[in-house]
Amino acid sequence: MLRDFLTKVVQEKESRHAAATDLDDIIRTSKLTLGLIIWTRDELHERGDPSSGSRS
């Protein structure tokens, strides 16, 4: 029973490590650039659809 538990723990750790490695590769090879984005505190806390320009 302990052996099964430890085996699962190791497999989960290896799976997480593989996922993190894949994510690092994707981030490193991504060509996406967002540019400079600056929001005010009020803009960050606005409610509603930001594309409509309306505030609720």
Image (cartoon, rainbow, N blue to C red):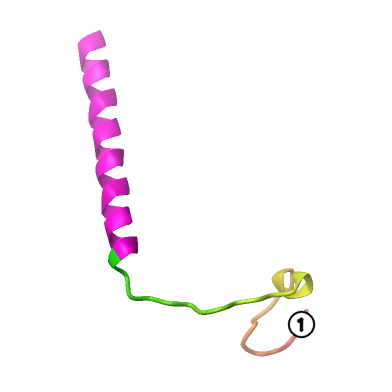
In this picture, is 15 found above or below 56? above
In this picture, is 15 found above or below 47? above
Point 26% across, 9% down: residue? 2
Q: Is residue 21 visible?
A: yes
Amino acid on which disc 1 is placed? Arg
Instruction: Please tell me whether residue 25 belongs to the stretch shown in magenta.
Output: yes
Q: Quadrant of residue 41?
A: bottom right
Residue 2 is left or right of residue 42, and the answer is left
Quadrant including the C terminus: bottom right
Residue 42 is left or right of residue 18, and the answer is right
Disc 1 marks which residue? 55
- Helix, strand or loop at mark 1: loop
In this picture, is 5 found above or below 27? above
Between 30 and 3, which is closer to the camera in this rendering? Answer: 30
Q: Position of residue 32 (x, y in %)?
A: 38, 76
Point 61% across, 87% down: residue? 51
Quadrant including the N terminus: top left
Residue interval drawn in magenta? 1-28
Name the chief secondary structure element in magenta. helix
Q: Position of residue 33 (x, y in %)?
A: 43, 77
Q: Position of residue 21 (x, y in %)?
A: 28, 48
